[in-house]
Amino acid sequence: MTVTATVVQSCQIVANDLSFGAYNPIATTDLDATTTLDVTCTSGTGYIISMDAGIGAGATIATRKMTSSGNTLNYSLYRNAARTQVWGQTSGTDTVSGTGTGAVQSLTVYGRAPAAQAAPPGSYSDTVTVTVTY
C-alpha cells in the first residue's frame, strides 16, 4: 500500500483592530497606539505583508485618514517602534516579509495620530486592507 499526501503552501492572517482611544486636539504630543497582525504560514513558506492607504478620502500610505461625518483625522501606520518606517504596499520597500514556521507569528503594527489636528468631536474610523502574499 502506498500512502501519499501533498502539502501545499498556505497562509492566513488575522488583523487585530487598532484603537487610538481618546484624541485631544489641543494636546501637544502625538497619540501612539499598537496592535498585532497574527500570520500563520506553512513551514518554509515565504510571505509579504502589505497594507493599503485605507478608505479615507485623500488618504495616502504616508498619511492615512480616519473620517467622521465628512471630517478627517490623520494617522500613520509603521513597521518599527521608532515610527520611522511607514507600512505600505510596495514589496521590498515598505512591506514586511518573513518565512512561515507553521505556528502563529505576531507582527506589531505601530500607529501614530499627530498632535494638534483641528478635528471636531466625533467617532472617527477607517478601514485598511491587510494582504498576505505568498
Image (cartoon, helix red, strand yellow):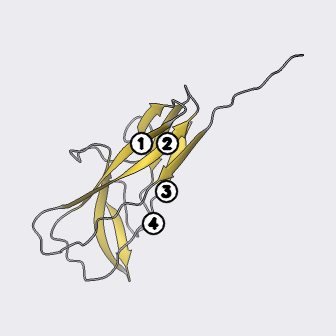
Residue mark closest to the camera, 4 vs 2: 2
Residue mark closest to the camera, 1 vs 4: 1
As drawn, the residue found furthest toward the left would be 28
* Residue highlighted by disc 1: 106
- Circles 1 and 3 in contact, beta carbons < 8 Å: no
* Residue highlighted by disc 3: 129
Q: CA distance from mark 3 to mark 4?
A: 9 Å
Q: CA distance from mark 1 to mark 3?
A: 17 Å
Residue mark closest to the camera, 3 vs 4: 3
* Residue at (45, 64) in percent of width and height: 127
Q: Nearer the viewer, residue 89 or 77?
A: 77
Q: Earlier in the sequence, mark 2 or mark 1?
A: 2
* Residue highlighted by disc 2: 39
Q: CA distance from mark 2 to mark 1?
A: 6 Å
* Residue highlighted by disc 4: 55
Provide residue 129's location: percent of width, then percent of height.
49, 56
Provide residue 16's location: percent of width, then percent of height.
44, 56
Q: Earlier in the sequence, mark 3 or mark 2?
A: 2
State the SS at label 2: strand
- Circles 2 and 1 in contact, beta carbons < 8 Å: yes
Provide residue 39's location: percent of width, then percent of height.
49, 42
- Circles 3 and 2 in contact, beta carbons < 8 Å: no
Q: CA distance from mark 4 to mark 2?
A: 23 Å
As drawn, the residue found furthest toward the top would be 1
At label 3, the amino acid type is Thr
As drawn, the residue found furthest toward the front would be 1
At label 4, the amino acid type is Ile
As drawn, the residue found furthest toward the right would be 1
Q: Earlier in the sequence, mark 1 or mark 3?
A: 1
